[in-house]
Each structure stands twice: as structure tokens, then as C-alpha cells.
Image (tube, rainbow, N blue to C red):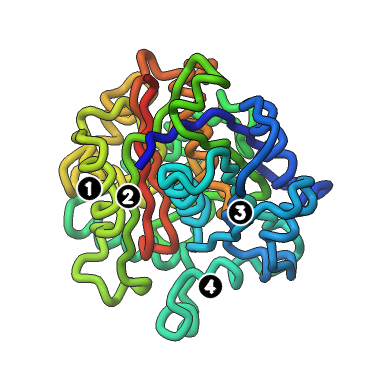
């Protein structure tokens, strides 16, 4: 297996992008990544996307995106794993380069969610249709059950969950591509419109349009394109039950833990060796559960750990420096690739006001559904 580097990144603004369609978003991000890398060809490409068929009535994205990017005849693949589609696309692109099958690979993620289609129905397709969606449960409802169970088992409070939203919006206020780049107060979160008790509006990530893309190549070849080598040193993926009722403990995201363990073992690292991380904060309770499953704090202590400021930009382990899904936005197929973009910006030292000091290693964790699938990657600047 060859060592693999990320040599180019591109991202669109996230938000209500009514003037751009699905293909335009993907192509914008891809062209930015190609320009950033300085490559003159692609050997293959990946498209991470969850719900184009439901939101846009468009499937066959491999052909569509290759065509509109001007890359006919190269192999192209559409990858779907719910909200982990982008992260899984990155993993498969990484494996293709590492195996020696291809040298220059584009990995992009995209979602066009604001089309007039029923977003609740489309997103619920990532849950168990017969045992969850059929009975009227939605993802806010599923994560509300996780939150209630976590509160009952560990004493987690609404104030602690609110601290996650406040911190992520503070980071997002420094991100020019964020959908909601404004600071909010704890009172705003606590007094927001209820969505699914105990979660309110500001505990939930938004519906978003957007795309992100990266270029991968072997480390030896990367030296031709850049003096700053960002190497992929760990990659892990895992699945769990799709339905909450089939898990032994719904407060512990076992797929996140398993994927993280694989990535740590591959990199030869422990959680304390990571300088910062992007995790899947589709809801505030999700970030708390993710940092526990990844070993950044003790299981059950994610609430007080976050409230104490340990996950802030200047904290023990900065989490979601981009603003996360909560502030940056969550165009589901693009999210996992956008996390990699943030890691590269931090490791290059080009993250501006949200730059983590002396960032050498970053972790990205992308998750599908209520934790039915998860992907973890660790990147390091050489």
C-alpha cells in the first residue's frame, strides 16, 4: 500500500443556494480543488451523495458529474452511506490511490436539499423505514431519545448541550463558507422553539445546499505539487444497527468507536495525540456522544467536558473548528468531504481566525443516520 496525500481542496458556500443546481455545486467545488492542486488530469473520481433521487429526482451521478466536469471516459462512482456518504467516498478514493490502481483521484461530496421536496421524508430514508419512519419517528425524534437517555444515565443537562451549539456558532462566525456564521448565546439555545424534547431549534443542524472536493495522490508524487504534504495516516469505517431499538445502549455510538479504533490503530496513535477534530454534530447531543466514543473524554462526561471549554478553539481538544454541521451547514453528501477540507486548511495553517495553534494532526468523523455507519480519518502534516 502506498502513502497517500491530499494535495487540493475546494468548497462552495453552504446554505440556501437557490441559484445553483446539483451539478453546478459539484463542479464548482471540484474545479476549485483541481486548481488548488495544480493537476492537469484525473484518473478517476468519486461522488458522495445521499438523496439526489429524492431531492432532485436525479440518479446516475457518476456519469452526470463526470460529463459536466469535462471528464468523460474516466471511471466515476457515486457513493451512498446516508450522511456518511462523503466520508466513505473519501475512504474509497484513498484506498484506490493507496492500492496503486490510480494516481490522481478526485473525491467530491454534494447535496442539493432545497428543492421544494419534503426534507423530513428524504432524510428519514436513512432510518429504519419499517420500524422507525413508519411509526412517525424523525431524526430529531431519534436523537431526542438519545439525549433523554444520556441525561437519565449520566446527568447530562440542557445547558451542557447548549454549550456545544454556542461554541460551534462562535467557530462558524469565523468561517466565510458557513451557512449561519453568527454567534449565539446559551439563552438563545435554551429558549428556542422546541423541536423534539429536549432538543430545540438551535440544537439541530440545518437543511443545506453545498459541495466540497479534494484531490488525492501518492505522497511521492505530491512533492511535485506542494511543499506542504498532508498525509492520510489513519482510516477506519464501521457500521452498527440502523435502528436504535436494536442497540444495547443508545447513549454509546458503537460504530463511531469502532471506526475510530481502526483509524487510531492504523495511525499508531491514541486520542490524546490528536490536536483537533471535526465530528458529526448533526445535533448537539451527537457531538457529545461522538467525543466520548472517540476517546476525547470519558464515556458519560461529554456534557461537562464541553461545558468546561475543553472543546473550544483554545481548549484541550478543539472540536468542529469549522463551525460543524450546526453552524457551517449540513448538505449531507458534502459534509464528510468538507470535514477533510477543514483538516487540510488547519494543517496548512490557512484557517484564519479559527486557526488552531501548532496543528499537526487532525481527525474527521462522519456519521450516517443515528449512528448506523461511521467513517474516521486522521491526517498529519509532514
Q: Report the mark closest to the observer, 1 or 4.
A: 1
Q: Which of 154 and 56 is in front in this view?
A: 56
Residue 125 shows which numbered tag? 4
First reached walking from the N terminus: tag 3 or tag 2? 3
Q: In which quarter of the image is residue 149?
A: bottom left
Q: Mark 2 points at which residue?
A: 236
Question: Does dot 1 land on a helix, a strand or a loop?
Answer: helix
Q: Callout 4: helix, strand or loop?
A: helix
Q: Earlier in the sequence, mark 3 or mark 1?
A: 3
Q: Quadrant of residue 174?
A: top right
Q: Which of 60 and 338 is in front in this view?
A: 60
Task: Give the number of the mark in front: 4 or 3.
Answer: 3
Residue 282, percent from left and from top: 46, 51
Question: Residue shown at 35%/36% (left/top)?
Answer: 378
Q: Name the residue under label 3.
A: 47
Choose the circle earlier in sequence order: 4 or 2: 4
Residue position for label 1 = 261
- Quarter of the image with the C terminus in it: top left
Q: Does the CB distance between marks 2 and 1 fall below 8 Å?
A: yes
Amino acid at each position: 500500500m502506498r502513502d497517500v496525500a491530499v494535495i487540493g481542496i475546494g468548497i462552495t458556500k453552504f446554505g440556501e443556494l437557490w441559484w445553483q443546481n446539483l451539478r453546478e455545486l459539484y463542479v464548482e467545488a471540484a474545479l476549485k480543488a483541481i486548481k488548488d492542486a495544480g493537476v492537469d488530469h484525473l484518473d478517476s473520481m468519486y461522488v458522495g451523495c445521499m438523496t439526489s433521487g429524492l431531492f432532485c429526482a436525479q440518479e446516475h451521478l457518476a456519469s452526470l458529474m463526470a460529463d459536466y466536469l469535462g471528464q468523460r471516459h474516466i471511471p466515476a462512482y457515486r457513493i451512498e452511506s446516508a450522511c456518511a456518504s462523503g466520508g466513505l467516498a473519501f475512504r474509497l478514493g484513498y484506498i484506490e490511490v493507496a492500492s496503486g490502481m490510480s494516481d490522481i483521484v478526485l473525491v467530491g461530496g454534494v447535496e442539493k436539499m432545497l428543492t421544494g421536496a419534503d426534507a423530513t421524508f428524504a432524510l428519514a430514508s436513512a432510518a429504519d423505514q419499517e420500524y422507525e419512519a413508519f411509526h412517525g419517528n424523525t431524526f430529531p425524534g431519534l436523537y431526542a431519545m438519545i439525549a433523554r437517555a444520556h441525561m437519565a444515565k449520566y446527568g447530562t443537562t440542557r445547558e451542557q448541550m447548549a454549550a456545544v451549539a454556542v461554541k460551534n456558532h462562535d467557530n462558524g462566525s469565523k468561517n466565510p463558507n458557513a451557512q449561519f456564521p453568527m454567534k449565539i448565546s446559551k439563552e438563545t439555545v435554551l429558549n428556542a422553539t422546541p423541536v423534539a424534547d429536549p432538543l430545540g431549534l438551535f440544537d439541530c443542524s440545518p437543511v443545506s445546499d453545498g459541495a466540497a472536493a479534494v484531490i488525492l495522490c501518492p505522497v511521492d508524487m505530491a512533492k511535485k505539487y506542494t511543499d506542504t504534504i498532508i498525509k492520510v495516516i489513519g482510516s477506519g469505517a464501521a457500521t452498527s444497527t440502523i435502528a436504535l431499538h436494536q442497540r444495547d445502549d443508545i447513549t454509546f455510538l458503537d460504530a463511531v468507536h469502532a471506526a475510530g479504533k481502526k483509524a487510531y490503530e492504523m495511525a499508531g496513535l491514541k486520542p490524546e495525540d490528536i490536536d483537533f477534530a471535526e465530528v458529526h454534530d448533526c445535533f448537539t447531543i451527537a457531538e457529545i456522544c461522538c467525543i466520548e466514543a472517540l476517546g476525547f473524554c470519558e464515556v458519560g462526561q461529554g456534557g461537562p467536558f464541553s461545558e468546561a471549554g475543553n472543546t473550544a478553539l483554545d481548549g484541550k481538544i478543539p472540536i468542529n473548528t469549522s463551525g460543524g454541521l450546526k453552524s457551517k451547514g449540513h448538505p449531507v453528501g458534502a459534509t464528510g468531504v468538507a470535514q477533510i477540507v477543514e483538516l487540510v486548511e488547519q494543517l496548512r495553517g490557512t484557517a484564519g481566525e479559527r486557526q488552531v495553534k501548532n496543528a499537526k494532526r487532525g481527525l474527521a468523523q462522519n456519521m450516517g443516520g443515528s449512528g448506523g455507519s461511521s467513517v474516521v480519518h486522521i491526517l498529519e502534516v509532514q
